[in-house]
Image (spheres, helix red, strand yellow):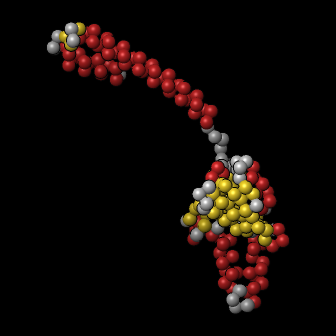
Amino acid sequence: MILQLLNIMIIFSFGNYGSMNGLNSFSNIALISGIINKKKKNNLNMQIKNNKNEEKSKLGPEKVYFEGPPSKVELIIPFFSILTVIGIIPFITTLLRQFWVNYKITNRRISVDSGFQGKNRAEVVYRDIKKIKFIKRLGGQAADVVLVLKDNAQLELRSLPNWEENLNFIKNNCSSDVEFN
């Protein structure tokens, strides 16, 4: 359709003036339409090649390995500290962390939703991780995992439940040059 409109435009523009550069208008139309057809074929070939490359680069669906709040084990010690007046504050903060923090570990990224009603989100892609540090808490029931990124920013996963399984999953998805401490 575009080709037909272009041909009509050329006929109207050159048809009344006889010839252009010594050629009549019909030969100009044939020449221009031949060039457009060649470009159109090249574009089609390029599109076919791009479709083949897109099929190769398609990623599988994102699969959630772990999703949930921090470990409930972190509530034990602050609960017993309620007996003192000062212990109320640590208990309230750990209790609020249970409601306001949510970890999500997938095969593509790690995300942490935090803040009131989960309004703050921090996401890390595995290729950005440079170093992984961890410290066991409460006899190994949970662990604090710190992900150091290539720009030296840190993402802390406090009181990560099932930390051994989750850490192994993270290690398997990271590149081989990631340091572990």
Figure quadrant of residue 18: top left
| Residue extending furthest toward the bottom | 85
Residue plotted at (75% across, 89% down):
83
Figure quadrant of residue 24: top left
What is the quadrant of the C terminus in the image?
bottom right
Residue plotted at (81% across, 73% down):
138
Horizontal placement of 117 versus 94: left or right?
A: left
50 w.r.t. 160: above or below? above
- Could you tell me if residue 109 is visible in this image? no
136 w.r.t. 82: above or below? above
Figure quadrant of residue 27: top left
41 w.r.t. 138: above or below? above
Q: Nearer the viewer, residue 61 or 148?
A: 148
Picture coordinates of residue 7, whole percent (x, y): 29, 17
Residue plotted at (59% across, 57% down):
151
Picture coordinates of residue 31, whole percent (x, y): 32, 12
Residue plotted at (49% across, 25% down):
46
Q: Nearer the viewer, residue 75 or 149?
A: 149
Picture coordinates of residue 96, whole percent (x, y): 65, 75
Picture coordinates of residue 137, whole percent (x, y): 78, 71
- Could you tell me if residue 1 is visible in this image? yes
Horizontal placement of 78 versus 55: left or right?
A: right
What is the quadrant of the N terminus in the image?
top left
